[in-house]
Amino acid sequence: MASQTKVALESWTSRFHAGLVTLLLLSVGHFVVDLYAGSLGVLQPFFVDKFRLSLTQAGVLGGVLVFSSSVTQPLYGYLSDRFRSRLFCSLGPAVTGLFILGALRAPSFAWAVAMMVAGGVGVSAFHPQASSWASAGMATSKGRWMAVFISAGTLGVALAPAFFKEWIERLGFESVVWAALPGVALSVATLALVQPPAQAGARTKSFDWPALRAVRRPLIILYVCVFFRSAVQVTYSQFLVLYLSRERGYSLHEAAYTLSLYLTAGAVGGFIGGHLSDRFGAKRVIMHSFLWSVPLMAMFYLTPAGFGVAALVLGGLVLLFTIPVNVIVAQDLVPSQAATVSALLMGFAWGTSGMIFVPLTGWVADRLSLHVALSGLLVFPALGFFLARMLPEELGR
C-alpha cells in the first residue's frame, strides 16, 4: 500500500510539474504575443509619418491586424481541437514579433499591411490552443490559473506602449524589429518543452454540435457582450495615443504612459473580476462591469486632465472585469470544444468588433474629431448592461 501511495504521489507530482511548466511557458508566451500585438497603438504615429497616412488609413492598418489576429481564431481553435499539434502555440511568439515589428521596415504601406496580416496569423494561432492548454494540466483551481494566463496577456498589451516608446526613444524606430528576439527564443523553448495535456483528449473530427446547440443562447449573449466591450477596448488601445497627442496636447511620452496605465488597470481588473465572479456569479460581474464603466470613462472627457485620467484608468479596470470570466464560463459550458469557444470569445468577438470600429473610428475622426469618435463609443457598454441582464442567474457559479 505504501509503495502504491508513493507511486501515485510521484505520478501526481510529475503531472503537476509538467502542468506548471506548460502554464508558465504559455503565460509568458501570452504576455509576449500580446506585447507585440499591442505595439501598434504607440507605433501608429510612426506609421502615419513614414507612409503619410490619413487617420482612415491608420484605422485600416489597425483593422487588418485585428481581423488577422482575432476574427480567424475560431478556425485555429477548431484545428487545435482536432490535431492537438503544439505548433499552434509554439510558433506564435516568433511569427507575431517578426512580422508586426518588421512592418516598420516595410518599403510601402501595402507591404506594411501584408506584414500586419502575417503577424496577426501568429496571434490567431497561439490564443485558442494556449488558452485551452494553459490550465488543463492543473488538477485544482483551474479558474485561478486561467486568470493568471489571461491576465498575463492583458499585461502584455498594457505594457506595450511604454515598452516600445522607451525602445524607440533609446534605439530608434528602425531597430524595433530586434525586439522580436525574445519571442523567437520563447518559441524554441515552447516547442521543446510543452506537450499536449492528457486532459485535452483525443483528436476530434468535427465540432460537437449538440453540445454547442444546447447552450447557444448564453453563448450568443456572451459573444455580443464581448463584442460591445471590445468596441471600446480595442479602439482605445489603437487611438488613445493619437488622441492624447493630437487633441489633448500630451507629449508622446505622456500619451504612451497614459495608455499603459489604462491597459494595466484592465489587467488588474481581470484578476479582480475572476475573484468577484467566484463570489457573486458571472452575471452580476458582467452587468456591473458595464454599468459602472460608462460614467467613469465619460468623466475622462468632461473633467480636467489629472482627474479625467484617473477616471479613465478606473473605468478601464472595471470594464475589463469580465475577460477571464467570459472565457471560463464558455469553457464550462462546452468543455469538449474548449479551444473553439475560447477563440469565439477571446478572438472572434474582439476581432469582429475591432475590424468594424477601428476603421470606422478613424473615418469619423477624419470628419469630426477623435474626441467625438472615441467618446461616442461609450454607448456600447451601456447597451451591454441591458443585454447582460438576459444571462442565466446561475451562470459561472
Image (cartoon, helix red, strand yellow):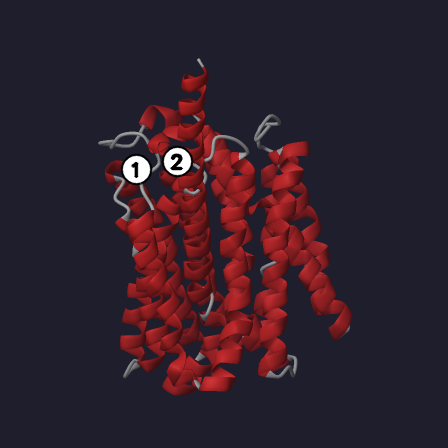
* Vertical order, 300 against 288 (above or below): below
- How far from the left and from the top, in percent, is residue 76? 30, 47
Which of the 4 image quarters holds residue 46? bottom left
Which of the 4 image quarters holds residue 23? top left
Assign a secondary structure to mark 1: helix
- How far from the left and from the top, in percent, is residue 289? 65, 46
Assign a secondary structure to mark 2: helix
Residue type indicated by callout 2: Ala
- Left or right: where does residue 174 sit relative to residue 206? right
Residue matched to label 2: 338
The answer to whether residue 8 is visible is yes
- How far from the left and from the top, in percent, is residue 88? 29, 50
Q: Give the residue at x 42% y 66%.
A: 36
Residue type indicated by callout 1: Asp
* Vertical order, 345 against 40 (above or below): above
Residue 81 numbered tag: 1
- How far from the left and from the top, in percent, is residue 328? 50, 37
Q: Are marks 2 and 1 in contact (CB under 8 Å)?
A: yes
